[in-house]
Image: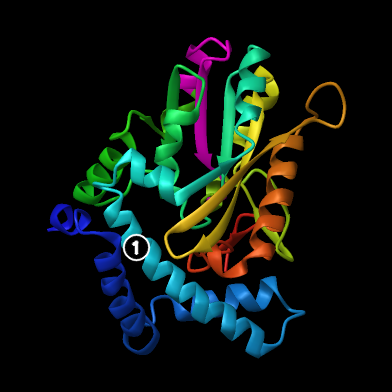
């Protein structure tokens, strides 16, 4: 059924998104309390009316994202190029010219799934997408196949270090990380200030970039309209000649927060991002 739905024009697909939005707002209320708490903690300076406006727009964007993800099962490269505007692609050529592999970082900003179409614009021979396995194998297989359909290769999160270390750092590989996941309580090694809160973060991607002296690029995503996105690629650079310990992670979360604050309704607020703090469940 999902494959059939994915083959419908987006104009039709968004009709389903509109219905889903009404159900979400007035019937389902998916993780409403989580979203409200996250917004309240992240933006204490905003009024309740402002936070509610963000919440309403987030619900609409979330429903669009759900249907766009279904569409991603069949969408073609040409249509993705029409809907995704890329700015500053030259940073990838610069990283390759330095003979460095590229660490491409994005957050859960809508619609990160449509970055699959970027593959045609990257100068590296090999393109890898790091992913967290979904417990439902059917869903996991569908999502992975959608991401690989245009030529990307998928790497499970637990296999990332082994894979990157086994490859030469020669400018021929790009690795895409959605890097704002929340580590489990037992895996927390570092926390920092992010969106007004103490936030546990994964550090593995930063350690790899610092150890191997990889080129680091951030996907600064903006919503330009329904089914229209712009991505500006920003090279993250060390303050000194080489990366300091923890610098990649710190710079990533700084620019991610800037990106979120610019369009706050476009980030995945329904994620239980602050479920754990400093290794303590609360």
Going by the picture, which residue comes out furthest to the right?
240
**Residue 189 placement: quadrant:** top right
- Give the residue at x 72% y 35%: 236
| Residue range highlighted in magenta | 162-181
Say if residue 131 shows up in the picture.
Answer: no
Residue 107 rendering spot, x and y as whole percentages? 56, 50
Lateral position of residue 23 relative to residue 85, left or right: left
Near-viewer residue (197 or 124): 124
Quadrant where the image shows the N terminus:
bottom left
Image coords of residue 59 (percent x, y):
45, 75
Image spot of residue 129 (x, y percent): 43, 34
Note whether residue 185 is visible.
yes
Q: Is residue 169 magenta?
A: yes
In this rendered view, identify the residue nearer to me: 225 or 133: 225
- Report x, y in % for residue 271: 49, 64
Name the residue beneath numbered marker 1: 66
Q: How many marks?
A: 1
Query: Is 120 within the magenta?
Result: no
Q: Residue at x 37, y 30 (%)?
A: 152
Q: Which corner quadrant holds the C terminus?
A: bottom right
Task: Tell me the residue at 47%/20% (across/down).
Answer: 162
Residue 70 found in image quarter: bottom left
At a point 66% along the width and 89% down the height, the residue shown is 48
Note whether 207 is above or below 223 in the view shown: above
Left or right: where 120 falls relative to 3? right
């Amino acid at each position: 059924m999902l494959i059939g739905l994915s083959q419908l024009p987006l104009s039709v697909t968004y009709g389903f998104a509109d219905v889903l939005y009404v159900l979400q707002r007035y019937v389902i209320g998916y993780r409403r309390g989580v979203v409200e708490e996250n917004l309240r903690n992240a933006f204490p300076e905003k009024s309740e009316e402002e936070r509610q406006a963000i919440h309403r727009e987030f619900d609409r964007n979330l429903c669009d994202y759900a249907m766009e993800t279904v569409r991603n099962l069949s969408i073609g490269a040409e249509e993705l190029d029409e809907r995704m505007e890329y700015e500053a692609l030259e940073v990838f050529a610069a990283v390759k010219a330095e003979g460095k592999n590229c660490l491409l970082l994005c957050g859960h900003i809508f619609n990160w799934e449509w970055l699959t179409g970027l593959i045609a614009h990257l100068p590296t021979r090999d393109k890898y997408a790091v992913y967290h396995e979904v417990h439902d194998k059917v869903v996991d297989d569908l999502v992975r196949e959608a991401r690989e359909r245009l030529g990307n290769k998928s790497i499970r999160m637990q296999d990332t270090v082994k894979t990157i270390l086994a490859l030469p750092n020669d400018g021929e590989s790009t690795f895409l990380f959605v890097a704002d996941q929340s580590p489990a309580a037992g895996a927390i090694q570092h926390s920092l200030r992010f969106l007004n809160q103490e936030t546990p973060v994964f550090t593995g991607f930063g350690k790899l970039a610092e150890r191997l002296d990889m080129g680091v690029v951030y996907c600064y995503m903006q919503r330009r309209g329904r089914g229209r996105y712009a991505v500006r690629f920003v090279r993250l650079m060390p303050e000194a000649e080489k990366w300091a310990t923890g610098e990649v992670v710190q710079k990533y979360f700084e620019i991610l927060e800037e990106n979120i604050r610019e369009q706050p309704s476009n980030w995945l607020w329904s994620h239980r991002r602050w479920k754990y703090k400093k290794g303590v469940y609360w």
